[in-house]
Image (cartoon, coloured by chain):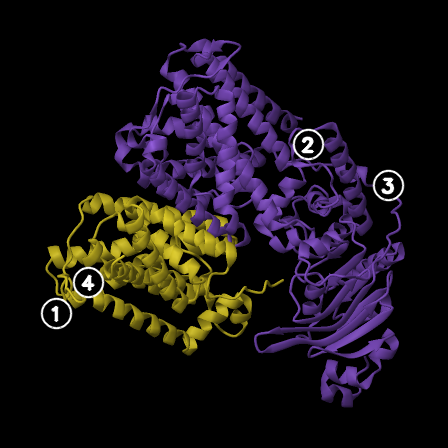
Chain colours: A yellow, B purple
Amino acid sequence: MDIDVFAHGIVAGSLYALVAVSFNILYRPTNVFNFAQGELVMLGAMIFASLTSLAGMPWFVAFAATLLAVGCIGLVEERIAVAPILARSQTGTGWVITTLATSLIISNLVGRFWGPDPILVKPPALLSMDSLDIASSRISSYEIALVLLTVVLVAIVERVYRTLKGKAVMAVAEDREAALLRGIDPGSLGRWSFFLGAAFAAMTGVLAAPILYASTSLGPDLLLKGFAAAAVGSIGNNRGALIAGYVIGVTEAVGASLLSPGYQEAVIFMVVLAVLLLKPEGLFGSPNARTV
Amino acid sequence: MLRAVVPYVAQAAALGAALALPAFVGANSYALFVATQLGIYVIAAIGLNLLAGYAGQVSLGHAAFVAIGAYSVALLTVDHHWPFWAAAVVGMVLAAGLGVLAALPAFRLNTWYFAFITLAFALVFEKMIVEWRWLTKGFAGVVGVPPPSAFGHEFGPRPLYYTVVAVTVVAFILVRNIVHSRFGRAFVAVRDVEPAALAIGASPQRTKLTAFVISAALAGVAGAFFAVQKTVVTPDDFTADFSIFFLLTVVLGGLGTPWGPIIGALVFFLIPELLAGLQSWRMLIYGGLLLGLMLFAPHGLYGALRQAWRRFAPAPPKAGAAADASEAREHPPIAGLALDISGLRKQFGGVLALDGVDLSVPAGSCCAIVGPNGSGKTTLLNLASGYYVPDAGSVKIGGVEALGSSAQKIAARGVGRTFQTPRLIADLTALDNVMLGAYTRERAGLLATALRLPSARAEARRLRQEALGFLHFVGVADRADVEAGEIPHGQQRLIEIARAMMGGARLILLDEPAAGLSMSELERLERLIMRICGLGATIVIVEHHLDLVANVASDVTVLDRGTVLAAGKPAMVFNDERVMRAYMGERALKAGVPA
């Protein structure tokens, strides 16, 4: 097996880790696992592609506009599809269906708007998708930058959780009512986390676009692999998500090169099942105490 | 009168219409084809409704289980010339078996893991159908699936239609029987209030698994008929859209309602005819419908109809159940279990909740645990009943070590408990909530219940009487047929005690039973606790209300910051200076406030 397979596994794994982190941002204060997250990633890629390739906007302006736009869509999702359901009951049945419905609506609207053809997105200035031929590996400068950026992003997110606001998020995740008594407003945190989680998803889409192209098929694919990374790395644990992302990415690349590309999903599925069977709480988590 | 007749009339009319249809349409007509297909979808939808509606586990990959049934029948009948019936059984078993293998890890986890796993399973399965060309013939699919035959006669469209109707009716009745049994009550308990499921000794994993096996098996059966009806089986038949379609069918008709899947499928088959021009908008409409229904009609069309009907013909007060329980009955004595706790220790992160607590409660006595907030009282109950795992120490129940047993195992040993905030199942009636308590005592198995064998029916009737007796014992028999969510807080507490007694509890743990009760309710509670004690049960009560404690408890243990501050007779303990200081603070003690 050559080093190229491994390198591409790490690149793909970085993207999966970013999706997993966006899941986590949203999950921590709300305990909601957004089934529309994959479509938010896709939406980020599509909006960004249109703004740069079609409207010719500068990279950073388009980047900021995309994050803001998708963040607002996340907020709308929270207001319409999640908050009313959570107000009625905290059990999962309701919001699984409503966030899934949201994902159907987004993906079909986007499909009608943009059509099925993938859009090519160029990496930002100074970086390119041309392969570098270092040590017989055909990795590009953009891909190297993406892997490094992912590590930095995970570190930043972890750092934010150590601030006062971050601790408030953890407190709400732990015990909603107790946090309420300490003057933390779970509702406001829920709205913010949907905004930020959606914006982070959009950023993932923007970063993925030069490698995977912007197309409607991004959504379901990244949803499942992002879930795999989040579950294997323990839900809520961002460093775990990073490592699990690598594990998923490399397993997928190796599996595909040994068997056939058609087995990609099957191999990942088996890994996730095996991990959850042996360690239900994921590789990097501790079982939560139930509270009565 | 009208109310009682309507459901039967509706059922008879639905069945009559279904049976009469072939008389009005040609054997090879499109109408009969669609009607057969409708029946097949209803079979799968009935299973999904049991799983998602009653047990609360949303399957997003139901198409895959239908596909397993369809491919099993197609491959076994075409390539290996098996008879349809044997192949259908294989399809059913494979659908349930493969489904369980995939979903097994998800049952220990949150609901949405299951949704994700089923979604991923369907996706992987769809890919594998294409990948395993040598088995499934890839994109081309399996062609020429022969119709079923019996006694040497091949089934035409009409017999096939009747067979599907028969299977649909059987599935409907079996699932309805299960829903109305202890299994159905456990499904709803696991869906809505998992701690309550543990308290009655029902394992959430096993319960979810049961619902899933039934659901996947029904999907497999539906798939078997799908194959023979279409005669061609291709991977394109079982896309993610198909799974969404099943989910929408159930949500549209009404999640967790008996008629939901049938109404949903019927409406669904009418809509496409109306929306023929909007084919390309289909998935968008599905998404919008799913969202709108969950927000504005969580119980679907059936729920909306029921609500309208109730407004039109309000329910008369039911006298039946209450009258049954009006006569007082003798309750057999209870052989209390002793509780011996020693050196119990529990740490939550940096907080030491309990630090070496000893507690001894002799069989048949009533012991109270008091102490300031945060002193570890509820933690002690949660450790004794298996909800938490202690870091060190021993918990002996009736002389047998209980440490390391799960909450539901400890419950099955005869430990009943109540919660600080009552954990009743809001959607079930008070009587059903009490009957839920008997979960581990009921002997009838799933099959006997589904078939309503005489033994299962006799047992259910006996337990119903017993549950009414316990409702009467705690003094809320008049509420037997009211949904628990509509019952006042104080009475919910009493129903929770009845549920614990119904479970055959010999050691009853009460967590702040007097919180939020009015003065008159408090007196009733006091008398009730004394009566339960009088029957011989052991009671451990965590309580702030010291008057109540002084009246009912023979021993009091005072906890303070995770350790035992004092233990002994109430009168002695309450005059202990250290206890008064811990409870009321230094200043109050100096001011001389009486205990």
At label 3, the amino acid type is Glu
- Is residue B427 visible to the viewer in this orientation of the structure? no
Same-chain status of marks 1 and 2: no
Q: Which residue is pictured at 69% across the width and 65% down the height? A: B383
Q: Residue furthest bottom?
A: B590
Same-chain status of marks 2 and 4: no
**Residue B590: x and y, percent?**
77, 90
**Residue B351: x and y, percent?**
60, 77
Residue B448 tag number: 2
Residue, disc 4: A137
Residue, disc 1: A126
At label 1, the amino acid type is Leu
Residue, disc 3: B327
At label 2, the amino acid type is Ala
At label 4, the amino acid type is Ser
Disc 2, disc 4: CB below 8 Å? no
Q: Please tell me which residue lies in front, B303 or B96.
A: B96
